[in-house]
Image (cartoon, coloured by chain):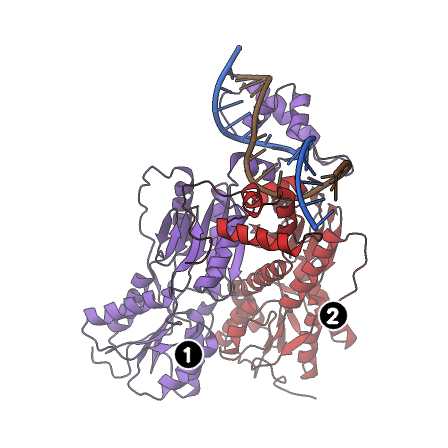
Chain colours: A red, B purple, C blue, D brown
Amino acid sequence: MAPGVGRTSDSPAPRSADVARVAGVSRKTVSRVLNNEPYVSDDARQRVLAAAGELGYRLNHAARALASGRTRSIGVVALGTAGYGTASLLVRIEHAVRDAGYTLRVVNTPDGDPEGIAGAVESLIEQGVDGVVVSEPVVEGEVPVHADVPVLFLGAPPAFDAARTLTVGVAAHQLARVATEHLLDLGHVTVHHLSGPLRWYASKDRLEGWRAALAARDASEPPVVEGDWSPASGYAAGRELASDPSVTAVFAAGDEMAIGLIHALREAGRRVPEDVSVVGFDGTPVFAYVTPPLTTVRQPFDAAAREGIRRLVHAIEKPDTDLPPASDPPVELVVRGSTAPPPLHQG
Amino acid sequence: MAPGVGRTSDSPAPRSADVARVAGVSRKTVSRVLNNEPYVSDDARQRVLAAAGELGYRLNHAARALASGRTRSIGVVALGTAGYGTASLLVRIEHAVRDAGYTLRVVNTPDGDPEGIAGAVESLIEQGVDGVVVSEPVVEGEVPVHADVPVLFLGAPPAFDAARTLTVGVAAHQLARVATEHLLDLGHVTVHHLSGPLRWYASKDRLEGWRAALAARDASEPPVVEGDWSPASGYAAGRELASDPSVTAVFAAGDEMAIGLIHALREAGRRVPEDVSVVGFDGTPVFAYVTPPLTTVRQPFDAAAREGIRRLVHAIEKPDTDLPPASDPPVELVVRGSTAPPPLHQG
DNA sequence: TTGAAAGCGCTAACAG
DNA sequence: CTGTTAGCGCTTTCAA
């Protein structure tokens, strides 16, 4: 049996004073060892560690937080939806947070609206987090919360009254542009766009990227079809678009919407990609295995989470120093089978 | 501007003593109001609430935790993968935890192996959670951790040395059985099985369900093909199975594997569902929109999370009383387009 | 390099 | 119904 496991469960949990007694040092020295502070003799350090192991000692974080005013925890306001994108981002954030030596508190806000976010941030701050990350909120309205800790917005602009707000984009604009250009390069005269809910910042950003790509090629800009990220909304959009023979290429702001869209198109007799090309957005791995395999742009979730947490932790720990900027996240177009030249290729 | 937002950020945060002073009561009365304890006059309650609002008071959870020995938080050990299943479960857990008046701490263990789980539980307990939920771990080996708080295993058997371990299944056995029976009912002579990694409890449970369904109908049991939950592993399995003409029906232990499987089957010239029927497992919504739409069984994530958290909270708050058992989670077969009678239907 | 004393902000137990 | 008195277990001074 491993050391420290043998403590009988009815004896009270050991405290730092117990460790100090067994190790023959003061409580402060125990504290120094536990916090990796300098000015502790190797000998004392060894004895403390041995005593802690022997006693099965576990530091009480609540007491530490109360005494130090810091919790070494970060709170995240996540979207309470289980899509590939948001779930991936959350997993990456957890990983980055843990690697930075912090722990994670999570609150979901199903709608991502300002009030929900405000309430979530409020509860996180009450729990004493050292920093907050807000993952892809909607953009309408300001978030009416006073935060004393740094707040990181992942994939959205600051709209917050906080000690320090940070923003890390997920390169959505550029990804959308690359997706659209891919279609244009194939020879399509223009590209239709199936967006997410326009209240969402993520939707606006992607829409702007699409618009910029069109403008750069002097392509006309067809009306936007608005979805809600769900495959069902993509399906509905597909039925609408299928009846318009001028539609030969569509950029969907999410992979799941793209899948619904393709399904409707094919049901209506429009072949994909022979008659209509479709590009998704996210890079969901499983859609490499559907028919046709989905061409998409991969969101750099890991890079965004790492860079965001790096900057957040920096703001927590050394608010007055500068942080060297990070390299831009990779922009990755994944060409699979859902895109092809238009039916009457004039290229 | 809302009340309480105006506090200048350089003045120190108000404490309960400040609220008490402004309200003209003792600190204990403030505490009573904040904790919804009885024996406070309405008048005093109003004054306390007003003072708290005016001051922008926020309770310090670290201090409360230290004084009371409880944190009102629950830790969850999650699988660090972003599949639909695990992500959904996590979202449901968060929701159930919040509804119960607790907050959530999350630690991921990419592999779900005992050591990883042990470390995760250890760190959670150190952070002072009142209870732990371990979501779908693998089964091999015991988890060498001594937990003083109740531990809930969601979808796995107890293998833990804890004050109290609870288990809530996700009806995987029965769901697997229903999926298999659906295929048998269609007239298939037997059903092949593409499992998850056999080290995982979730895989074993589904495998048992499949096996039970086969045995009940005196169907022969073909060798199991083992995947790793990924669509790529489903694809590999599909290439293998495609070359065996006796394969007319496959039950895949996960939707994503089923998608990969179908892709390989069709590439090899086996039509789905005309030549081979495939049933998935999870109920992923988007796969209603692929070709063919995937027949699957829906996992009762919400019911499992709610029931699990209900029992965990009960174990935390009233460990000595009994809890009325919950009704069984619903078993839902979602018949879509990937299943049909076998090619030479003898039914 | 080490230790003694003084809290951090809250709730528990008990008395009114 | 309300208040008083003690801590919870740690880190922070500050002095040795």
Figure check: B23 above or below A167 = above
Q: Position of residue A242 (x, y in %)?
A: 56, 73
User: Is residue B292 left or right of A323 when viewed as pictured?
Assistant: left
Q: Where is residue A181 in the image (x, y as percent from the top left)?
A: 70, 77
Q: Foreground residue, B336 or A303?
A: A303
User: Is residue A126 left or right of A215 when viewed as pictured?
Assistant: left
Q: Which residue is drawn at 56% across and 37% down?
A: B66
Q: Foreground residue, A55 or C1?
A: C1
Q: Which residue is drawn at 32% across and 46% down?
A: B326
Disc 1 is attached to a residue of which chain? Answer: B
Give the residue number, with chain letter if any, for mark 1.
B261
Q: Residue at x 28, y 72 (%)?
A: B183
SS at mark 1 in the image = helix
Q: Position of residue B92 (x, y in %)?
A: 47, 53
Q: Foreground residue, A127 or B2?
A: A127
Indicate which disc residue A328 carries. Answer: 2
Residue A199 visible in this rendered orientation of the protein: no
* Amino acid type assigned to the residue bearing label 2 in the image: Asp
Figure check: A45 above or below B264 = above
SS at mark 2 in the image = loop
Tag 1: Cα neighbours inside 10 Å, few (<14), some, or many (≥20)? many
Quadrant where the N terminus of chain B sits is top right
Tag 2: Cα neighbours inside 10 Å, few (<14), some, or many (≥20)? few
Figure check: A128 above or below A270 = above
Residue furthest to the left: B218
Figure check: A175 above or below B108 = below
Q: Position of residue A268 (x, y in %)?
A: 50, 74
Disc 2 is attached to a residue of which chain? Answer: A
Asked if badges 2 and 1 are on one and the same chain, I answer no
| Distance between the alpha carbons at the discs numbered 2 and 1 | 37 Å
Quadrant where the C terminus of chain B sits is bottom left
* Amino acid type assigned to the residue bearing label 1 in the image: Leu
